Image: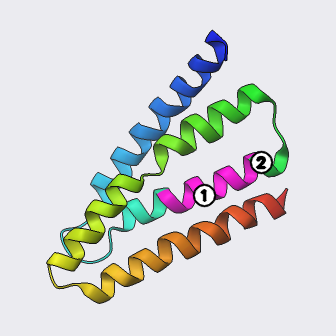
Amino acid sequence: MTFLDIVMVGIGGFLGAMIRYVMAKKMNHSAGIPVGTLAVNGIGALLIGLVFGLELSRGWTLLLASGLAGALTTFSTLNKELIELWRNGEKKNAVGYLVLTYGGGLILAALGYVIV
């Protein structure tokens, strides 16, 4: 790992984290499925599929997959939101959110890979 590798991951990570924050603030509401988090996880999965399907250079892969998609997607927030939905009695939304996130994520990653 070189200094440039670290810089590429850092730049992508900064951008991904900022995009995730803005989308969650604008799209997540107090009740129901957190659409913002669902969207960033889906976009991140699609992006990872595209990056690996394109077989980009190491620098671009670090920037886009490890940095941007890695910070854009969020496993910890997903789990927090699933617990909150469940505790608030929104069990159907919790299960739907879980299925949409993982099932949709796998489909989107595969779609991104196949597209290119």
Residue at 33% from the left image edge and 62% from the top image edge: 79
* Residue 28 visible somewhere in the drawing: no
Colour pattern: rainbow
Q: Is residue 77 left or right of residue 72?
A: left
Image coordinates for residue 2, horizontal then vertical, percent: 67, 12
Image coordinates for residue 94, horizontal then vertical, percent: 32, 79
> What label sits on residue 21 in the rendered view?
none
Location of the C terminus (image quadrant):
bottom right
> What label sits on residue 45 in the rendered view?
1
Sooner in the amino-acid sequence: mark 2 or mark 1: 1
| Mark-to-mark CA distance, 2 and 1 | 11 Å
Q: Is residue 87 left or right of residue 75?
A: left
Q: Nearer the viewer, residue 12 or 88?
A: 88
Q: Nearer the viewer, residue 52 or 47?
A: 52
Which residue has dot 2 on it? 52
Do tag 2 and tag 1 residues touch (Cβ < 8 Å)? no
Segment colored magenta: 41-51
SS for tag 1?
A: helix
**Magenta residue check for 48:** yes
Q: Is residue 31 left or right of residue 94?
A: left
Main SS, magenta residues: helix
